[in-house]
Amino acid sequence: MSTYLRRTLLAASLTLGLAGFAGVTLAADALPAVDNGKSDTNQMGSVTVALRLRNQDALEKYIRDTVTPGNKNFQKFLSTADFAHQYGASDADLATVQSFLKKNGLQTEVLGNRMAIRATGNLSQLSATFGTSFHDYTSVETGQRFRKPATAVKLPTAVANLVIATTGLSSQHKYVSHRVRAVGAAPPLPSFNAKTLAAKSATPAKAASGNPTASGVEGEFTVGDVANFYNINPLYNRGITGKGSTVAIVTLSNFFPADAQAYWDGIGLKTKKNRITHVLVDGGGVFDDGSGETSLDVEQSGGLAPDANIIVYDAPNAGNGFTDAFIQAVVDNKAESISTSWGSPEMFNFAALNIDGASDTDTTDVGDLQLFHQIFMEAAAQGQSVFAATGDSGAYDTVRGLGTGTGPGEFSAPLSVDSPASDPYITGAGGTTRPFKFAFLGPDGVTPGPTAQIKNESVWGWDYIQTYFQKNFNEDIGVFSVGGGGGVSVYWHAPWYQLLTPGVKTSEKNQALTFNDVDGPFTYLKLPAKFAGRNLPDISLNADPETGYIVVSTVDGGVSEGNGGTSFVAPQLNGISALLRQSAGHRIGLWNPQVYAMHLVFGSGALTPFNDIKAGDNWFYAGKSGYEPGAGIGTLNVANFDIYLRSGLFNIFR
C-alpha cells in the first residue's frame, strides 16, 4: 500500500465541503451585485481596442501551409513585423481608430502586431469616448468591489466597423485557474528539500525506476513521473533537455520564482540557473489563491524542459489583463511555446445573463473570443505552439462558474466547454486518471471503505468517487462534475483538422442554462443542437489530483501533495514542446493539424505516438477507441511523437 493510500485512509471525512476541495468558485459575472452608484471620474483606466485583421482567409491558409510537409511554406514562420505588414490593420484603419481615441484626450500605443491599440485616461475621458458611464459594484457573495460600464459601449459606425473588441473597461475578475486538490488532501508543509520524497515513501513504486526524479507515489508525482508515464526519457537520454528553447506562461496571479527552483532542487533535478524572466503586464497580478497556479505552471513546464528559458507574463485577473498578457507574449515572439491554465466558460462570452444586478449588455458580445482567435492565429503564423487547460468541470463547464442543482435559487447547467481552450488555433489540454488503488473514509470520518482500483488510464471524472460512496456508504457526496473538461464548442465550427476524425461529435440537443427561481425555471440561454463545433480536448495527460502532483508555493504555505487539474497538463505540454523544438531544430508551430494527421495515419497501433484512452468518462463523454471529447486523441508517447514529427512522413493534407 502506497504512502498516499495510507494517508487517504486517514484523511478527514468527505462530509466536509467538497466544493472547496474541487476549487469550485462562482464566476464574478454570474453573481448578484449591489450598484454603489457612479464611479469617481478622476480614476484612471485603460482599454485595449482590437482591430480586425486583414486578409484573414489568406492567413488561415498560410498557417496550414506552415505545418504541411512538402508545402513551399512548410516551417517558414513569420516574424512579428512580417505578420503586422501582411495581416495587421492598415495605416488608414489605425489612423481612424487612433484619432477617435485621442479626440477625448486618451493616450494611445499601437502594438507591434498592428492588431491592437492600448489607450489610457481617466474615467471621464473613457466615458466620453465609449458613450457610457461607469458604476461601482459590490459582489453580494464575495464582497469584491469592481467597476464597469453601466450601459453598452457605443462607437461611431466608422470605428465600430474596424473594431472587434474593446476590453478592459470592466475591472471585474472573470477567469479561474484550473487547479484541483485531492479529496482530503493534507495541508502544505512549510519546507521542502531533496530528502523529502524519500522520507514520504518507504517503498517507492516501480514507476520511479525509469527517471531518478520520479516519486512513484500517487498524489506525490513529479515531472520525473510524467517522463516515465509518457515515454519522455529517450529524449533525455539523447541530450534533449530544452536547451535553446523558451517557454512562456500566461497567468493572472503573482508568484515567487524561488518556489520553482526549490521544487526542481527538491526532486534532485539539475536545471539551467537564472532562467526565469518575470514580465508584469498592466502592472502584474497580485499574490492570491491563484499564485500556486503560477508556481506549478513554471515548475511543470520548466521541470520537463530543464534547460529551457522561461518567461512568465503575469497580468491582473480583471479587465484586459488576460488578453493583454497573451498579446504581449505573442508580440514579443521570444517563446516558441506558450501555455495558460486559466479560463472561463465559453458561453459567458456570448450569453446575456442579467443576473449580476448591473448591466445585461456587457456579456452579450463575443469580442474576447474574437480577440483571442486573432492572437492565436498570429502565434500559429509565427510558429508558436499554444496550449490551454480545458477545465476541471468535466463536460459541464459552467458548473465551475455557477454551480448546479434543481432546487430554488440554483442553476441547471448545460454541456459546455471552456475558453480560450475552445479556440481552433490552440491545443486543448485535457485530463486523465492514472491506474491506482484507493480507499476513502465513510461519512462518520472513522470507518474506512474497501479498497477499489482504477485498472487502466481513464478519462478523468470523479463519478468513480461518487459511485464508490453510493455503493459502499449509500451517500451522495456531491462531486459532480469534477473532471477533465471536454465537449463541443457552440461558437467555433469544427476546424479542418477534425473534419476527417472519427469520433468527433456535434452538440447535443436540449441544452440550456436555466435558473430555478421560486416562481419556476427561467431559461437564460438555449444552446444549438447538432452544431458541428470544434471538439476538445485535443491531447490529455494525467490530471486527477487523486493521482496528482507535488507543488511548491510559498503563498499556499509550502509544499503540498494531492494537486491536479488540467492546470498541470497545459504546462506539461508546453515543456514537452520545448523538448521537441530542440530535437527538431525548429519551431513546431500549431500542434493540432499535425497530431490529428498522425492520429489518422497511425491510429492506436504499436508504433503510434498516442496512447488510446478507452475507459472512464468526464460525466458525459466516455473513453473509447479513437477520438472522443473526454480525453481527445489520448495521451502522448513522446518519443514516438518526436520520431514522426522529425520525419514529416505522417502528413496526409497535401
Image (cartoon, helix red, strand yellow):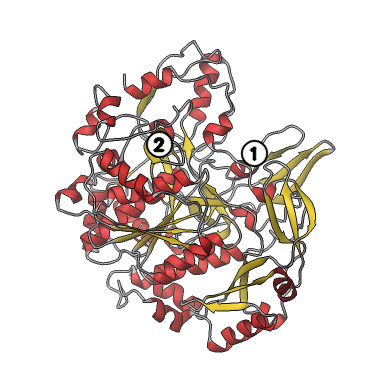
Residue located farthest toward the right when viewing the structure as drawn: 519
* Residue holding disc 1: 403
Amino acid type, residue under disc 2 in the picture: Gly
Q: Does 503 appear above or below 477?
A: below
Residue located farthest toward the front when viewing the structure as drawn: 42
Residue found 31% across the figure and 51% down from its top = 302
Say left or right for 222 vs 119. Answer: left
Say left or right for 430 vs 351. Answer: left
Residue found 42% across the figure and 74% down from its top = 61
Percent coordinates x, y for residue 568 in the rendering? 40, 44
Percent coordinates x, y for residue 313 in the rendering? 44, 60
Residue found 49% across the figure and 10% down from its top = 447
Depth check: 175 or 438 in front? 175
Q: Secondary structure at mark 2?
A: strand
Q: Does 351 appear above or below 32?
A: below
Residue found 32% across the figure and 42% down from its top = 263
Q: Secondary structure at mark 1?
A: loop
Amino acid type, residue under disc 1 in the picture: Gly
Specify the label residue 558 is tagged with.
Answer: 2
Name the quarter where the N terminus is drawn: top left
Percent coordinates x, y for residue 370 in the rendering? 57, 66
Q: Does 149 appear above or below 210?
A: below
Say left or right for 191 vs 149. Answer: left
